[in-house]
Amino acid sequence: MFLISSRRGFTSNKAFSNTDLVSIIGDVKTRVLTTEERFLSHILSEKILLIVHGFNNPFSYILPEYMQLREQYKNQLGNHYDYIVGYTWPAGESEIDYFQAKKNTDTAANRLNDWLCKLDDINCTVDIAGHSMAAMVGYKSLSQETSAQIRNIFSFGAAIPKKMLLKENIVNQALGKVEHVYAFYNRNDHILKYLFRLMEGSQALGCAGLPNSGYFENQKGKITAIDCTDINISHTGYMRSSEVTEFMEAVLRGQDTGRFTKLEKRDMDTSSSLRMDYEYALN
């Protein structure tokens, strides 16, 4: 697995490096630095899933988490991607780092945008899977002037104020660089429902869902909202959820998911957890 780090010394939880570094990760104890040139030559014209984490993810946690996700996605989505690539940034190491991590999303967005442009330049097909505050990094990155083009964004429990999406000109600019956005949310996400609202004074997209259904009419079906409330996952549980990964696989197979979808808890006798609910209303 390739891992791109914007952290100082590759592992800092609070500070940025002067330049990003790339490592080849064999396991949690094996990390070998490589050059940007070798990395880009290796993935030339390949299909990439880029994983981006959110707030309060110390490097000691992120490394084994990314390794597990690599194995999970390799097993379940391996037919659709040539490489799983991780991106990591200094997102804090405890709850008290929230505002510093939020500030750090500006620099992380710039770094991410640089990488997306490089991947676009070498003709990669890029999907992004981002959790929580990664949505803020991605939103700020794609709101910039950039040549990068993204196929799919899978946004899990986005820790981004719902009211930010009312800035229609910025949203349109960001969505102009993306083929499709899949916004997963959970109305029972206690982290976003209570702590995020306490810190931001606003509902989070990853808890409340999208604004009213008519708001994105001019985006020609670029956004699908996925209600995960019924599958009873925690704020940090999306990427490990079999129901969520099954939905991603259906998307990559070309299944039409519509504009609104509700996931149901998979039962032992059911091969699919995906139920299309085109009449499902989001408020």
Image (cartoon, rainbow, N blue to C red):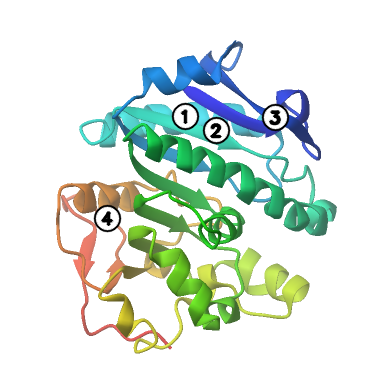
Query: Gap in Å between the C-alphas at discs 1 and 2?
Result: 5 Å
* Between discs 4 and 2, the one toward the N terminus: 2
Q: Callout 1 environment at 10 Å: few (<14), some (14 to 19), or many (20+)?
A: some
> How many residues crowd mark 2 within 10 Å: few (<14), some (14–19), many (20+)?
some
For mark 3, give the secondary structure: strand
Q: Which residue is mark 3?
A: 19
The answer to whether 212 is drawn above or below residue 176 in the figure is below
Work out whether mark 4 precedes mark 1 in sequence or the reverse, and give the earlier one: 1
Where disc 2 sits, the SS reads helix
Q: Residue at x 55, y 36 (%)?
A: 87
Q: Residue at x 15, y 53 (%)?
A: 254
> Is residue 242 or residue 171 the one in the foreground?
171
Q: Nearer the viewer, mark 1 or mark 3?
A: 3
For the C terminus, the quadrant is bottom left
Q: At 74% across and 50% down in the image, what residue appears? A: 104
Give the label, 4 or 3, closer to the camera.
3
